[in-house]
Amino acid sequence: MTIGIRAVDHIGIAVADLDAAVALYTSLLGTGPTAIEEIPDQQVRTAFFAVGDLHLELLVPTADTSPIAGFLAKRGPGIHHICFEVPDLDGALAECRRQGLRLVDETPRGGAHGKRVAFLHPKATGGVLLELCQARRETPCSSHPRTPHT
């Protein structure tokens, strides 16, 4: 049995300076972010950029205790995680447990734009931090909308 991955939703990139990173990616992609949002319970501020059928999520810590702050201190800026869309997050986590995969999140938590997300531990996934997000019926899954905000 599989966890039902439908697509790569986004790639999370840890940055030290969100304004500088937004300026860089705006220049590289020729368009600005589709959304910028602070997620207090995860102690991050995010900016999303549409790139084809997926997004780049720039992440900057808002507190020294943020997991992103720890990542930056240990590894510096760079790719933090890959997020996969799943149709049933609770079912996907149950299947991960059944397969014996180590989870960061035993239950879903809130992500950007009110999405439900959960992370799989990198020790269970070949050294890559994987995030799962649940698809919405009205739009493709993401922790952000697929169309620019107005």
Image: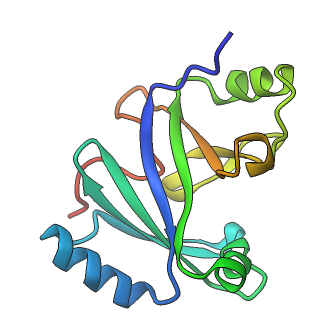
**From the viewer's perspective, is 63 left or right of 16?**
right
Residue at image coords 78%, 41%: 124
Q: Residue at x 82, y 21 (%)?
A: 99
Color encoding of the figure: rainbow
In the depicted view, which residue is nearer to us: 40 or 32? 32
Q: Is residue 89 above or below residue 108?
A: above
The residue positioned farthest toward the left in the image shown: 30
Q: Tell me residue 29's x, y (percent).
A: 18, 67
Picture mark count: 0
Task: Give how far across and how far down residue 48 sits, in percent.
Answer: 37, 63
> Where does the image place residue 5, in percent across and percent down from the top left?
53, 26
Q: Is residue 64 above or below residue 53?
A: below
Residue 45 position within the rendered picture, expressed as x and y whole percent measured from the top left: 53, 76
Name the residue at 65% across, 73% down: 40
| Residue sitting at x 64%, y 21% | 3
- As drawn, 72 above or below 147: below
Which residue is outermost to the top? 1
Can you say which quadrant of the picture contains the N terminus?
Answer: top right
Quadrant housing the C terminus: bottom left
Report the side of 145 relative to 1 (left or right).
left
Outermost front residue: 126
